[in-house]
Image: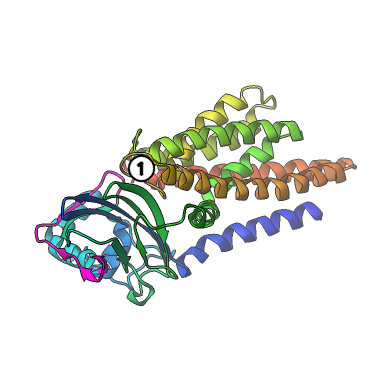
Amino acid sequence: MRLLAFLAALAAVLLIATPAQAHVRATSVAVDLRSQGDDVAAVVDVEYDALARLLSLDGVLSPDAVGVDGAAPEVPTEVRRSSLDAHASDVAAYVGERLRLSRGSIGCTAEEGARVELADSGAVQVALAYGCPASGALTVRSDIFRASDGVVDETKTLVAYDIDGRRGSTLLDTARTSVTVGRTDLLSEIPQFVRLGAEHLLSGLDHMLFLLALLLGAKRLRDVVEVATAFTVAHSVTLVLAAIGWISVPGWIVEPLIALSIAFVAVDNLLSPRTSHRLPVVFGFGLLHGLGFAGALSVDGPLSLSTLADLVSFNVGIELVQLTIIALAFPALLFLRKAATTPVAARALTLGTVAATVAVAGAGLVWFVERSPLLT
Protein backbone atom coordinates (compact mmCIF):
# COMPACT_ATOMS: atom_id res chain seq x y z
CA MET A 1 0.00 0.00 0.00
CA ARG A 2 2.86 2.36 0.79
CA LEU A 3 4.36 1.63 -2.61
CA LEU A 4 1.07 2.31 -4.36
CA ALA A 5 0.66 5.55 -2.44
CA PHE A 6 4.18 6.62 -3.36
CA LEU A 7 3.65 5.86 -7.06
CA ALA A 8 0.25 7.55 -7.08
CA ALA A 9 1.74 10.67 -5.51
CA LEU A 10 4.58 10.64 -8.00
CA ALA A 11 2.18 10.29 -10.93
CA ALA A 12 0.00 13.09 -9.58
CA VAL A 13 2.98 15.40 -9.25
CA LEU A 14 4.14 14.67 -12.82
CA LEU A 15 0.67 15.07 -14.27
CA ILE A 16 -0.01 18.32 -12.42
CA ALA A 17 3.42 19.84 -12.99
CA THR A 18 3.28 19.79 -16.76
CA PRO A 19 0.03 21.70 -17.37
CA ALA A 20 0.86 24.09 -14.53
CA GLN A 21 3.53 25.60 -16.75
CA ALA A 22 0.79 26.80 -19.09
CA HIS A 23 -0.70 29.04 -16.39
CA VAL A 24 2.57 30.56 -15.17
CA ARG A 25 4.54 31.21 -18.33
CA ALA A 26 8.11 32.39 -17.96
CA THR A 27 10.55 33.39 -20.65
CA SER A 28 14.10 34.67 -20.90
CA VAL A 29 15.69 37.48 -22.87
CA ALA A 30 19.40 37.91 -23.54
CA VAL A 31 20.87 41.36 -24.28
CA ASP A 32 24.47 41.82 -25.40
CA LEU A 33 25.78 45.42 -25.40
CA ARG A 34 29.02 46.70 -26.95
CA SER A 35 30.19 50.30 -27.17
CA GLN A 36 31.71 51.57 -30.40
CA GLY A 37 32.78 55.16 -29.79
CA ASP A 38 29.61 57.18 -29.24
CA ASP A 39 27.49 54.29 -30.52
CA VAL A 40 26.24 51.24 -28.68
CA ALA A 41 25.45 47.99 -30.50
CA ALA A 42 22.80 45.74 -28.95
CA VAL A 43 22.01 42.14 -29.89
CA VAL A 44 18.79 40.88 -28.30
CA ASP A 45 17.65 37.23 -28.23
CA VAL A 46 13.96 36.62 -27.48
CA GLU A 47 11.74 33.54 -27.52
CA TYR A 48 10.00 33.08 -30.86
CA ASP A 49 6.73 31.66 -29.48
CA ALA A 50 6.23 34.57 -27.05
CA LEU A 51 6.95 37.10 -29.79
CA ALA A 52 4.65 35.27 -32.23
CA ARG A 53 1.75 35.38 -29.79
CA LEU A 54 2.30 39.06 -29.07
CA LEU A 55 2.64 40.22 -32.68
CA SER A 56 0.62 37.42 -34.41
CA LEU A 57 3.62 36.63 -36.58
CA ASP A 58 2.21 33.43 -38.04
CA GLY A 59 -1.21 34.83 -38.85
CA VAL A 60 -2.93 32.24 -36.64
CA LEU A 61 -1.15 32.99 -33.39
CA SER A 62 -2.34 35.56 -30.91
CA PRO A 63 -2.12 35.95 -27.12
CA ASP A 64 -5.23 33.73 -26.89
CA ALA A 65 -4.17 31.12 -29.46
CA VAL A 66 -2.77 28.20 -27.51
CA GLY A 67 -2.53 24.47 -27.96
CA VAL A 68 -4.29 21.84 -25.87
CA ASP A 69 -1.49 21.89 -23.30
CA GLY A 70 -1.36 25.67 -23.06
CA ALA A 71 1.69 26.01 -25.31
CA ALA A 72 1.80 27.76 -28.65
CA PRO A 73 1.22 25.43 -31.61
CA GLU A 74 4.45 24.17 -33.13
CA VAL A 75 5.43 26.13 -36.23
CA PRO A 76 7.90 24.80 -38.85
CA THR A 77 11.24 26.59 -39.09
CA GLU A 78 10.58 27.68 -42.68
CA VAL A 79 7.31 29.32 -41.63
CA ARG A 80 9.04 31.08 -38.75
CA ARG A 81 11.74 32.51 -41.00
CA SER A 82 9.25 33.74 -43.61
CA SER A 83 7.06 35.28 -40.88
CA LEU A 84 10.05 37.12 -39.42
CA ASP A 85 11.03 38.39 -42.87
CA ALA A 86 7.49 39.69 -43.42
CA HIS A 87 7.23 41.33 -40.00
CA ALA A 88 10.85 42.37 -39.44
CA SER A 89 9.94 46.04 -39.03
CA ASP A 90 7.28 45.21 -36.39
CA VAL A 91 9.70 43.03 -34.45
CA ALA A 92 12.47 45.64 -34.59
CA ALA A 93 10.06 48.38 -33.54
CA TYR A 94 8.78 46.39 -30.57
CA VAL A 95 12.22 45.40 -29.28
CA GLY A 96 13.70 48.85 -29.94
CA GLU A 97 10.83 50.52 -28.09
CA ARG A 98 11.09 48.22 -25.07
CA LEU A 99 14.92 48.27 -24.80
CA ARG A 100 15.87 51.82 -23.86
CA LEU A 101 19.40 53.12 -23.30
CA SER A 102 20.55 56.43 -21.86
CA ARG A 103 23.73 58.13 -20.76
CA GLY A 104 23.20 60.32 -17.74
CA SER A 105 19.76 61.84 -18.26
CA ILE A 106 19.97 61.85 -22.06
CA GLY A 107 18.30 59.04 -23.95
CA CYS A 108 20.06 57.19 -26.75
CA THR A 109 18.47 57.10 -30.20
CA ALA A 110 17.79 53.79 -31.91
CA GLU A 111 18.98 53.95 -35.50
CA GLU A 112 17.14 52.50 -38.48
CA GLY A 113 18.16 49.31 -40.24
CA ALA A 114 17.84 46.79 -37.39
CA ARG A 115 18.62 43.19 -38.38
CA VAL A 116 16.06 40.53 -37.49
CA GLU A 117 16.74 36.83 -38.01
CA LEU A 118 16.04 33.38 -36.61
CA ALA A 119 19.10 32.04 -34.79
CA ASP A 120 20.20 28.40 -34.86
CA SER A 121 18.97 28.08 -31.27
CA GLY A 122 15.43 28.90 -32.43
CA ALA A 123 15.40 32.32 -30.77
CA VAL A 124 14.65 35.54 -32.61
CA GLN A 125 17.80 37.67 -32.77
CA VAL A 126 17.45 41.44 -33.18
CA ALA A 127 20.56 43.56 -33.79
CA LEU A 128 20.11 47.24 -32.96
CA ALA A 129 22.39 50.27 -33.05
CA TYR A 130 21.98 53.25 -30.72
CA GLY A 131 23.48 56.71 -30.97
CA CYS A 132 24.38 57.90 -27.47
CA PRO A 133 26.02 60.97 -25.87
CA ALA A 134 29.79 60.62 -25.55
CA SER A 135 29.90 60.90 -21.77
CA GLY A 136 28.00 59.56 -18.80
CA ALA A 137 27.30 56.09 -17.41
CA LEU A 138 25.09 53.91 -19.60
CA THR A 139 21.72 52.92 -18.12
CA VAL A 140 19.79 50.01 -19.61
CA ARG A 141 16.05 49.52 -19.17
CA SER A 142 14.22 46.50 -20.57
CA ASP A 143 10.44 46.12 -20.67
CA ILE A 144 10.45 43.32 -23.24
CA PHE A 145 7.58 40.91 -22.49
CA ARG A 146 6.22 42.70 -19.45
CA ALA A 147 3.23 41.13 -17.70
CA SER A 148 0.78 43.70 -19.11
CA ASP A 149 1.45 42.33 -22.61
CA GLY A 150 -0.61 39.29 -21.61
CA VAL A 151 1.85 36.80 -23.09
CA VAL A 152 4.03 35.70 -20.16
CA ASP A 153 3.87 36.15 -16.42
CA GLU A 154 7.58 36.53 -15.75
CA THR A 155 10.63 37.55 -17.79
CA LYS A 156 14.29 37.13 -16.87
CA THR A 157 16.62 39.38 -18.85
CA LEU A 158 20.35 38.67 -18.87
CA VAL A 159 22.34 41.79 -19.80
CA ALA A 160 25.96 41.14 -20.83
CA TYR A 161 28.01 44.23 -21.59
CA ASP A 162 31.38 45.48 -22.79
CA ILE A 163 30.94 49.23 -22.33
CA ASP A 164 33.71 51.83 -22.00
CA GLY A 165 36.23 49.14 -21.10
CA ARG A 166 33.99 47.61 -18.42
CA ARG A 167 32.78 44.06 -18.93
CA GLY A 168 30.28 42.03 -16.96
CA SER A 169 26.69 40.86 -16.79
CA THR A 170 23.61 41.41 -14.68
CA LEU A 171 20.12 39.98 -14.38
CA LEU A 172 16.89 41.96 -14.67
CA ASP A 173 13.41 40.78 -13.74
CA THR A 174 9.95 42.12 -12.96
CA ALA A 175 11.11 43.83 -9.79
CA ARG A 176 14.27 45.24 -11.33
CA THR A 177 13.94 46.43 -14.91
CA SER A 178 16.95 48.75 -15.24
CA VAL A 179 20.63 48.83 -14.40
CA THR A 180 23.56 51.21 -14.86
CA VAL A 181 26.21 48.99 -16.39
CA GLY A 182 29.61 48.96 -14.78
CA ARG A 183 28.10 49.97 -11.46
CA THR A 184 26.74 46.60 -10.39
CA ASP A 185 27.93 45.01 -7.16
CA LEU A 186 29.38 41.55 -7.80
CA LEU A 187 28.10 40.14 -4.50
CA SER A 188 24.58 41.45 -5.07
CA GLU A 189 24.34 39.57 -8.38
CA ILE A 190 25.23 36.16 -6.94
CA PRO A 191 21.86 35.40 -5.22
CA GLN A 192 19.95 36.30 -8.39
CA PHE A 193 21.95 33.89 -10.54
CA VAL A 194 21.70 31.15 -7.90
CA ARG A 195 17.93 31.53 -7.98
CA LEU A 196 17.92 31.56 -11.79
CA GLY A 197 19.80 28.25 -11.86
CA ALA A 198 17.45 26.70 -9.30
CA GLU A 199 14.36 27.86 -11.22
CA HIS A 200 15.77 26.54 -14.47
CA LEU A 201 16.19 23.02 -13.10
CA LEU A 202 12.81 23.07 -11.36
CA SER A 203 11.09 24.11 -14.60
CA GLY A 204 12.88 21.40 -16.60
CA LEU A 205 10.90 18.20 -16.11
CA ASP A 206 13.25 16.35 -18.45
CA HIS A 207 16.29 17.02 -16.25
CA MET A 208 14.36 15.97 -13.15
CA LEU A 209 13.22 12.70 -14.76
CA PHE A 210 16.82 11.99 -15.76
CA LEU A 211 17.81 12.28 -12.08
CA LEU A 212 14.88 10.05 -11.12
CA ALA A 213 16.01 7.43 -13.64
CA LEU A 214 19.50 7.49 -12.10
CA LEU A 215 18.07 7.09 -8.60
CA LEU A 216 15.86 4.17 -9.62
CA GLY A 217 18.98 2.36 -10.85
CA ALA A 218 21.08 3.13 -7.76
CA LYS A 219 21.43 0.40 -5.14
CA ARG A 220 23.71 2.07 -2.61
CA LEU A 221 24.52 5.56 -1.40
CA ARG A 222 27.92 5.16 -3.05
CA ASP A 223 26.19 4.67 -6.42
CA VAL A 224 24.28 7.90 -5.94
CA VAL A 225 27.41 9.86 -4.96
CA GLU A 226 29.33 8.55 -7.97
CA VAL A 227 26.68 9.24 -10.61
CA ALA A 228 25.79 12.63 -9.09
CA THR A 229 29.46 13.63 -9.14
CA ALA A 230 29.94 12.46 -12.74
CA PHE A 231 26.78 14.27 -13.85
CA THR A 232 27.74 17.47 -12.01
CA VAL A 233 31.29 17.62 -13.37
CA ALA A 234 30.15 16.93 -16.93
CA HIS A 235 27.30 19.42 -17.12
CA SER A 236 29.37 22.09 -15.34
CA VAL A 237 32.06 21.86 -18.04
CA THR A 238 29.72 22.19 -21.02
CA LEU A 239 27.52 24.76 -19.29
CA VAL A 240 30.46 27.15 -18.89
CA LEU A 241 31.98 26.45 -22.32
CA ALA A 242 28.65 26.84 -24.11
CA ALA A 243 27.57 29.89 -22.11
CA ILE A 244 30.73 31.82 -23.02
CA GLY A 245 30.48 30.69 -26.64
CA TRP A 246 33.52 28.41 -26.85
CA ILE A 247 31.37 25.53 -28.04
CA SER A 248 28.04 25.70 -29.85
CA VAL A 249 25.61 22.88 -30.63
CA PRO A 250 22.17 23.70 -32.11
CA GLY A 251 19.21 23.14 -29.84
CA TRP A 252 17.51 20.87 -32.39
CA ILE A 253 20.37 18.43 -31.80
CA VAL A 254 20.78 18.84 -28.03
CA GLU A 255 17.13 18.71 -26.94
CA PRO A 256 16.20 15.40 -28.64
CA LEU A 257 19.38 13.78 -27.30
CA ILE A 258 18.57 14.95 -23.77
CA ALA A 259 15.18 13.27 -24.09
CA LEU A 260 16.85 10.14 -25.45
CA SER A 261 19.25 10.10 -22.47
CA ILE A 262 16.27 9.77 -20.13
CA ALA A 263 14.91 6.77 -22.03
CA PHE A 264 18.35 5.17 -22.31
CA VAL A 265 19.11 5.30 -18.58
CA ALA A 266 15.62 4.05 -17.70
CA VAL A 267 15.81 1.10 -20.11
CA ASP A 268 19.36 0.39 -18.96
CA ASN A 269 18.02 0.03 -15.41
CA LEU A 270 15.80 -2.82 -16.62
CA LEU A 271 18.25 -4.58 -18.92
CA SER A 272 21.54 -4.23 -17.03
CA PRO A 273 21.49 -5.27 -13.36
CA ARG A 274 25.18 -4.39 -13.15
CA THR A 275 25.96 -0.71 -13.37
CA SER A 276 29.75 -0.80 -13.83
CA HIS A 277 29.36 1.06 -17.13
CA ARG A 278 27.04 3.70 -15.64
CA LEU A 279 29.65 6.36 -14.82
CA PRO A 280 30.95 6.96 -18.38
CA VAL A 281 27.37 6.88 -19.67
CA VAL A 282 26.21 9.43 -17.10
CA PHE A 283 29.25 11.61 -17.77
CA GLY A 284 28.51 11.61 -21.51
CA PHE A 285 24.87 12.47 -20.97
CA GLY A 286 25.90 15.11 -18.41
CA LEU A 287 27.77 16.89 -21.19
CA LEU A 288 24.50 17.02 -23.16
CA HIS A 289 22.48 18.33 -20.22
CA GLY A 290 25.08 21.05 -19.64
CA LEU A 291 24.46 22.28 -23.19
CA GLY A 292 20.76 22.36 -22.36
CA PHE A 293 21.36 24.33 -19.15
CA ALA A 294 23.47 26.85 -21.09
CA GLY A 295 20.46 27.69 -23.23
CA ALA A 296 19.15 29.80 -20.34
CA LEU A 297 22.41 31.66 -19.79
CA SER A 298 24.39 32.71 -22.86
CA VAL A 299 27.19 35.22 -22.46
CA ASP A 300 28.86 36.95 -25.38
CA GLY A 301 32.23 38.63 -25.34
CA PRO A 302 35.39 38.09 -23.30
CA LEU A 303 35.23 36.17 -20.06
CA SER A 304 35.43 38.47 -17.01
CA LEU A 305 35.42 37.95 -13.26
CA SER A 306 31.80 39.10 -13.10
CA THR A 307 30.77 36.72 -15.88
CA LEU A 308 32.59 33.80 -14.26
CA ALA A 309 30.91 34.55 -10.92
CA ASP A 310 27.51 34.60 -12.64
CA LEU A 311 28.13 31.24 -14.32
CA VAL A 312 29.33 29.64 -11.08
CA SER A 313 26.34 31.05 -9.19
CA PHE A 314 23.92 29.74 -11.84
CA ASN A 315 25.51 26.30 -11.58
CA VAL A 316 25.33 26.40 -7.78
CA GLY A 317 21.57 26.99 -8.06
CA ILE A 318 21.26 23.91 -10.27
CA GLU A 319 23.30 21.82 -7.84
CA LEU A 320 21.28 22.91 -4.80
CA VAL A 321 18.04 21.73 -6.40
CA GLN A 322 19.70 18.55 -7.66
CA LEU A 323 20.99 17.72 -4.17
CA THR A 324 17.57 18.47 -2.68
CA ILE A 325 15.89 16.05 -5.10
CA ILE A 326 18.43 13.35 -4.27
CA ALA A 327 18.14 13.97 -0.53
CA LEU A 328 14.36 13.56 -0.66
CA ALA A 329 13.92 10.82 -3.26
CA PHE A 330 16.73 8.34 -2.52
CA PRO A 331 15.98 7.88 1.22
CA ALA A 332 12.34 7.31 0.26
CA LEU A 333 13.38 4.60 -2.20
CA LEU A 334 15.66 2.99 0.43
CA PHE A 335 12.81 3.04 2.94
CA LEU A 336 10.49 1.27 0.51
CA ARG A 337 13.14 -1.37 -0.24
CA LYS A 338 13.78 -2.06 3.43
CA ALA A 339 10.05 -2.11 4.21
CA ALA A 340 9.44 -4.84 1.62
CA THR A 341 10.20 -7.71 4.03
CA THR A 342 7.62 -10.18 2.73
CA PRO A 343 7.60 -11.92 -0.67
CA VAL A 344 4.37 -10.16 -1.62
CA ALA A 345 5.75 -6.75 -0.68
CA ALA A 346 9.03 -7.45 -2.46
CA ARG A 347 7.16 -8.49 -5.60
CA ALA A 348 4.96 -5.39 -5.42
CA LEU A 349 8.04 -3.20 -5.00
CA THR A 350 9.68 -4.79 -8.02
CA LEU A 351 6.57 -4.30 -10.15
CA GLY A 352 6.23 -0.72 -8.95
CA THR A 353 9.86 0.05 -9.76
CA VAL A 354 9.48 -1.48 -13.22
CA ALA A 355 6.28 0.51 -13.82
CA ALA A 356 7.93 3.77 -12.76
CA THR A 357 10.99 3.03 -14.90
CA VAL A 358 8.85 2.23 -17.94
CA ALA A 359 6.89 5.46 -17.40
CA VAL A 360 10.13 7.48 -17.29
CA ALA A 361 11.44 5.72 -20.41
CA GLY A 362 8.14 6.36 -22.19
CA ALA A 363 8.26 10.07 -21.36
CA GLY A 364 11.80 10.28 -22.71
CA LEU A 365 10.84 8.56 -25.97
CA VAL A 366 7.78 10.77 -26.45
CA TRP A 367 9.88 13.91 -25.94
CA PHE A 368 12.52 12.53 -28.32
CA VAL A 369 9.94 12.16 -31.08
CA GLU A 370 8.38 15.57 -30.35
CA ARG A 371 11.76 17.35 -30.40
CA SER A 372 13.26 15.59 -33.43
CA PRO A 373 12.78 17.77 -36.54
CA LEU A 374 13.11 14.73 -38.81
CA LEU A 375 10.32 12.86 -37.01
CA THR A 376 7.75 15.67 -36.74
Q: Which range is magenta?
A: 98-122
Q: Looking at this view, name the residue that lies furthest to the front.
A: 135
Give the image location of residue 271, x and y in percent: 63, 29
- The residue at the point 69 percent across, 58 percent down is 8
Quadrant for the N terminus, please: bottom right
Give the image location of residue 166, x and y in percent: 32, 48
- The residue at the point 33 percent across, 39 percent down is 302
Image position of 111 (left or right of 145): left
Label 1 residue SS: helix
The part of the image, by quadrant, that contains residue 216 is top right
Q: Is residue 33 above or below residue 173?
A: above
Q: Looking at this view, name the residue that lies furthest to the left.
A: 113
- Residue 120 versus residue 370: which sits nearer the camera? 120
- Residue 45 versus residue 350: which sits nearer the camera? 45
* Residue bearing the label numbered 1: 251
Q: For residue 27: magenta?
A: no
Image position of 310 (left or right of 334): left
Q: Amino acid at mark 1?
A: Gly
Q: Is residue 344 visible?
A: no
Image position of 195 (left or right of 254): right
The part of the image, by quadrant, that contains residue 213 is top right
Image position of 48 (left or right of 204): left
Q: Is residue 154 visible?
A: yes
Q: Is residue 199 above or below residue 348?
A: below
Give the image location of residue 193, x and y in percent: 49, 53
- The residue at the point 68 percent across, 45 percent down is 326
Q: Looking at this view, name the residue that lies furthest to the top.
A: 276
